[in-house]
Amino acid sequence: MHASASGMHAYTASSQKPWILHFGASSHMTGITQKFISLNMSNAHPSVKIVDATHSPVLGNRVFQATPSLILTDVLYVSRFSINLLSISELTKITTK
């Protein structure tokens, strides 16, 4: 499914939370732990500002299975995230390597 509003796009391959494509995000982020292939839990990461203008700690990062055919690296785990965020700048780095 694909939905679009105000220049933001959401893609989903199932009834799970969609992935939001974001031009301003510096990293891919999610609040879902179950799809991490590997997860490095750490409090060494800075917090991120979420939609309600509060800050939420990044609890870890690593490799995430977004869809059966899409594996993302360096995805941040933010437990308070209610969405999945795909960073356009990170996707661009992948395709230009």
Image: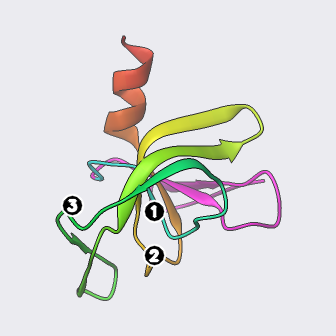
Disc 2 residue type (three-letter): Phe
Quick one: label 2, few (<14), some, or many (20+) residues within 10 Å? some
Q: Quadrant of residue 33?
A: bottom right
Q: Residue at x 31, y 68 (%)?
A: 58
Figure check: 45 above or below 21: below
* Residue at mark 2 to residue at mark 3: CA–CA distance: 15 Å
Residue bounds of the magenta highlight: 1-24
Q: Which label number is shown at residue 40?
A: none
The residue labelled by disc 3 is: 45
The residue labelled by disc 2 is: 81
Is 38 a magenta residue? no
Figure check: 78 above or below 68: below
Q: Secondary structure at mark 3?
A: loop
Residue 55 is situated, as x and y percent measured from the top left of the image, at 22, 82
Pointer 2 or 3: first along the chain: 3
The residue labelled by disc 1 is: 6
